[in-house]
Image (cartoon, grey):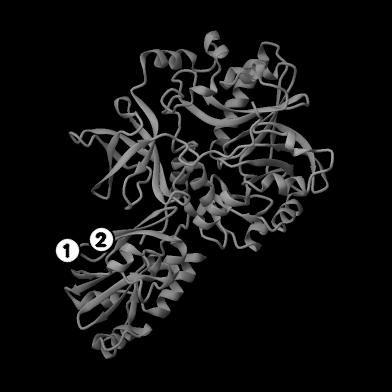
Amino acid sequence: MSLFKLNSRPTFFCKLRLSARSYANDVKKTKLHEFHVRHGGKMVPFAGYMMPVKYADSIASSHLHTRRQCSLFDVSHMLQTKIHGKHREQFMEQICVTDVQNLGMGKSALSLFIDDQTGGILDDLIITKTNGDYLYMVTNAGCKEQDMRMLTEQLSIFKSSGQDVSLEFLDSDEQSLLALQGPSSAGVLQSVVGKSTDLSGLYFMDSTTATVCGVPDCRVTRCGYTGEDGFEISVPSDRVEAIAESFVAHDDVKLAGLGARDTLRLEAGMCLHGSDISIDTTPVEAALMWTISRKRRDERRFPGASAILKQLSDGARRKRVGLVQKAQGAPVRGGAVLFNPVNGEKIGSVTSGCPSPTLSQNIAMGYVDSRFVKNGTDILAEVRGQKIPMVITKMPFVKANYYSKPK
Amino acid sequence: MIRIIKVTNCIWRNANHTQRLSASALRFSTSNVKDRYYTEKHEWIDVKDNIGTIGISDYAQDALGDVVYAELPSVGTEVKIKEECGALESVKAASELYSPVSGKVVEINSQVETRPALINQSCYENGWLFKLELSSLEEIPNLMNEEQYAEFIKQDHS
């Protein structure tokens, strides 16, 4: 047996494999490391941090618990950044695709950092226009160094023209990030926030500050990476353990790790940067053009605009699609090649795949030639020499359960 | 997920072991724990009358988590030592199976194909994977016995 391949962030894992021993010394720990170990977390190196991949429960049962009740995830490995200054919105519009100036106060959006030359996706992120005098964003742990370098470079160019903006990277030793995800998470969180915070008025992708477990000024954003209602809660690291203990003391709350996080996000049809999207894929190919507003497209000034708009009008040669396996069998994983069942030609490849704990079916995400993107199209995936029938299927695979504002 | 750092100096060969093998294991008399041998890839083999029963260790099933799919070699397949001959899939990952020794597949446990959870529930009994008719008994002494494997896992963890 070969135990195990963690199916994500190939660049990081290549690095790790090359220098397993020396690199081990550089792997950081979040402030919850002892907490995870105490609660039975199986710790693995991931994106430069030791993180829990699972706890005592299996990944599948942890996954189902999140869908039915709620789970607490430590996501402090991700990079939190505040952007200050009078021209912060203009600055962010230069490097990400979001219409920041028209984003409502206290609203968050999924955004993308784009390579201006190729239109490739450098990272995906959540950007928030806070009610305070700063923007707040959360970017991927696996892209941390690259993002910080890009942001710093862009900042110095931007400031050289006399603009007022500054960046504040929040180190995980100072600021931690928790994700409380699942249908019971609102009830659980409401029980520990101050009376002045009424979560029934905080809708999907709204962000506010609240006193959480007696800790003032925690940033609470109603978002997540599971397809469920839930919150990401940014808290000072010196209080994070007490807050996490308060959550897990609640009957509905269990801890969940990277394993369940990955299967939950795949069921929700969400991309993992480094697997499903990367510098080699554009928002057109990745079906993420919805992150770029009409106004920004019309202005043609977002990063990568010329490459992306050209591809949009010419048509992309491949698209990201969902795949469901028709029969039970070997799950199709990232890297599997996809074929046209009629003539056996290669038509694409899988970027993520797993057995879906909710659907009890194998699901996957990947890129196929644009001639095959229609839902219901039959294709074949190769696993260890066998051709496995799959069908192109609309994502999300499992219906999202967000707390959205009534229309 | 679980990374197992390869410990290169652990293939165990010494006189005591060989002696013990010839005295006891090579009689293939019981399916006792002491007759079970292990690979660095966490397969076990129990040899009786030239037929080896193969499965994965308790450590491996625990590391793998809930097995959802077992792909076993076909009966009649000739496999070589350390050759990839199947795979076990959990929610998170696929893990290849390697044959501990050379031989011909004479039987597979079709129960684990329909109920892969047996591998987690009973990895040494009902969750066995396949049986081989051994080409040679000479490959057996290169495997680890119970104590050596326990030590190997400890090193693996450190």
Left or right: A241 as drawn, with respect to A340: right
**In the rendered structure, the residue with mark 2 lies on which chain?**
B
What's the residue at 31%, 68% (across, down)?
B111
| Residue nearest the viewer, comparing A374 with A91 | A374
Counting residues from the start of the chain, the first of labels 1 and 2 encountered is: 1
Q: Secondary structure at mark 1?
A: loop
What amino acid type is highlighted by mark number 2?
Cys
Q: Quadrant of the N terminus of chain A?
A: bottom left
Q: Would you say the residues marked 1 and 2 are in contact, meaning their CB atoms lie under 8 Å apart?
A: yes
Q: Secondary structure at mark 2?
A: strand
Left or right: A154 as drawn, with respect to B7: right
| Residue nearest the viewer, comparing A261 with A12 | A261
**In the rendered structure, the residue with mark 1 lies on which chain?**
B
Q: Quadrant of residue A104?
A: top right
What amino acid type is highlighted by mark number 1?
Thr
Q: Quadrant of residue B84?
A: bottom left
Up the image or down, A94 lies above or below A338; here it is above
Is any atom of residue A27 visible in this view? no
What's the residue at 69%, 51% (across, down)?
A31
Residues at marks 1 and 2, CA–CA distance in whole angstroms: 9 Å
Give the labeled residue for mark 2.
B85
**Image coordinates for residue A386, horizontal then vertical, percent:** 24, 49
**Image coordinates for residue A214, horizontal then vertical, percent:** 83, 47
Q: Callout 2: 10 Å neighbours few (<14), some, many (20+)? A: some
**Image coordinates for residue B101, horizontal then vertical, percent:** 24, 70
Left or right: A341 as drawn, with respect to B30: left
What's the residue at 58%, 40% (across, down)?
A401
Q: Which mark is residue B77?
A: 1
